[in-house]
Structures are given as C-alpha cells and as structure tokens.
Amino acid sequence: MLRLFKLFVLLAVLLGGGAAWWVHQPLPMKAEMVDLSVEPGTSVPGIAQAVSDAGVQVDPSLLYWWFRLSGEARQIKAGSYELERGITPRSLLRKLVRGDEALRAVTLVEGWNFIQFRAALLKAEHLKPDTEGLSAGSIMSSLGRPGVHPEGRFFPDSYTYAKGSSDLAVLKRAMRAMDKKLEAAWSQRLPDTPLKTPEQALILASIVEKETGRASDRAMIAGVFVNRLRIGMMLQTDPTVIYGLGATFDGNLRRRHLQTDTPWNTYTRTGLPPTPIAMPGKMALLAAVQPAPTSALYFVSRGDGTSEFSASLEEHNRAVNKYQRGQ
C-alpha cells in the first residue's frame, strides 16, 4: 500500500505544475559521463532502473512515470548510450527515443589484407572482439560463407558501431558492402573483357589496388593485366608473390622469391591467382572491369608514384634503366 501511495503522489506531482520544472532540471550523476545499455525487449520500468543503475541518481519510479506520461515510452530504442553530466529528464528521453547511441568508428583501408583488418578490429575502441582466437575459416562460417576465402571479401570504408557491438557485426556489414560494390561493378563490365566471373574481377581488382601508386594509373594498370590475360602471358606482379610468401616475407623481395612457386606466384603460374590478395576499393573494382584501352604490356614505377607504360619489352627495358637504375 505504501508503494502505491508513493506512486500516486509521484503521479500527482507530474500531472501538476511540478513536472514542467523537474523535466528541465539536470539529473545528479556519479560521474561526468556514464554508460547506459538498453537491451532489446527491456520493459519501461527496466529502462528506468537501468538508468539509475548506470549512475544517474534518480528515483527509477519517478523516471518511469515520466516516460509513461510523455506518451513516448514505447518509442525508446535499445542501444548503447553515453549520458553526460547536465542531462535532464527531457533530454534523456529525447536521446533514447532518437536512438542517439554512442558511436565509434573503425576504418578498413584500401589495399589492406584480411590480417590487417582483423588487427584493426581488435584495436577498435569498445568493439567486442568475438572473433578473437577464431580461425579465418571459422569467421567466414559465422558470417554464413563457409569454405570461402576471406581475402578481398570486405569493402574498405569507415564503419560506425555502437559501444559494445560485436566485431562480427562490422565484418558482416563490410562483407555485404563488398557484395553490392562488386555486383555493381560487374554489371558495368566491358563486353570484351576476358574476365569470366565477378570473382575474377575481384581478384584482378585486388592486384590493381596493390600495384597502383597513383589513382589516375588504375585503369592503365588494369589494361596491362587484361592484355596479358588475353594472350596467356604471365602477369608477373610482385604483390601476388609477396602475398603468397605470407608471414615469411621480411620486406625485401629477392630473385629467389620470384622463383619460389606458390598458388599466388604469377611469375611461375599463368592467369589470375586463386584468391584476391587485398581489399580493393570502388575505383579498383571499376578499373578491373573497365580497363583503359591500351597496347601496353609492361609498366614500371617512375619513383614518384606514377608508372611508365610500354608496349614492347625493349621499351620496357629502357624505362627500367631510366627510372629504376638511373641509366
């Protein structure tokens, strides 16, 4: 009976003029900022109690009735929130109704491989490391792609997430984003492309991404590789060799590495490697399916981020002497 009387008094206060004053007053807090987690399916009384438990010094019953009488209690969204000192009952409710969660971001950089992306996820602030300790195969199974190699399957971009979110959720968003970008690029492929599947386009795009020092060269570099694929010429691209070496690569590519056969060594095997070697961005995907029309079969770095393209081995050797050997 005493609790019912207390609630009756609280209701009377809120229905009276006191409500207009109280809802605009800062709520006492135990710290400058507290974290509030509202789980899906939490009742309105449970949400009020969670606010109090988080460190906001307010009677949960009073807060509950404010939520109820506002007419917006059912619009409160689950999520992770940061409540800062000075927040009022009114601004608190507005934050919860808007779903104004505390967001962080993790960035997947164009040209990164899957190992680098996983390292970034592990370092990401307030991101739950559910994939920590899992093999790449287990992660892909968790994402609904059992047996699929993870390399190149995630689109490089910045992904926001709520505090306490799972890294698997970020990976799933990045995977779906790559699915859409690859599908869009494949639909724009040139009719005479030697690429037979979107998978091949993804593999070539990853090589273009790793070989490109300047964005303006992407289409020309793709053109060189497409020309080589058409005539059955080895791609002979160093990034694939490096990828095949894996953790054994010490940063110094030697002649013996070029002669060491792996599934990704394009100096010992013709055609595309079996998987992508990195995460290509949108422009690399488009370059792979829309390469520049060129007769070039070779290119070499000029040392300033750009490349010199040649149609013959003789021209290429002169370019190598000029830009690589200073002759």
Image (cartoon, grey):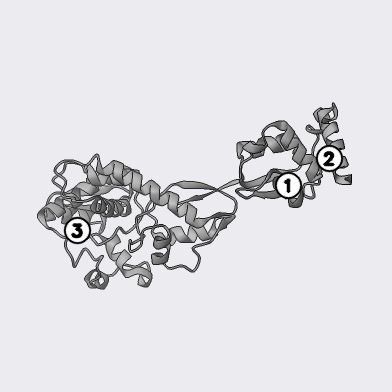
Q: Is residue 132 left or right of residue 42?
A: left
Amino acid type, callout 1: Val
Q: Is residue 163 left or right of residue 31?
A: left
Dots 1, 3 in contact, CB < 8 A: no
First in residue order: circle 2 vs circle 3: 2
Residue under pointer 1: 51
Which residue is more in the foreground, 3 or 18? 3
Comparing marks 1 and 3, which lies closer to the viewer? Answer: 1
Residue under pointer 3: 235
The quarter of the image holding the N terminus is top right
Q: Mark 2: which secondary structure?
A: helix
Which residue is more in the foreground, 294 or 142? 142
Badge 3: residue crowd in 10 Å (few <14, some 14–19, many ≥20): many
Q: Is residue 259 left or right of residue 17?
A: left
First in residue order: circle 2 vs circle 1: 2
Specify the farthest residue to the left: 231
Where is residue 303? Give x, y as percent.
31, 52
Badge 1: residue crowd in 10 Å (few <14, some 14–19, many ≥20): many
Where is residue 248? Give x, y as percent.
36, 72
What residue do we see at 42% from left, 66% from top?
138
Q: Is residue 68 above or below residue 246?
A: above
The quarter of the image holding the C terminus is bottom left
Q: How many marks?
A: 3
Amino acid type, callout 3: Leu
Label annotation for residue 7: 2
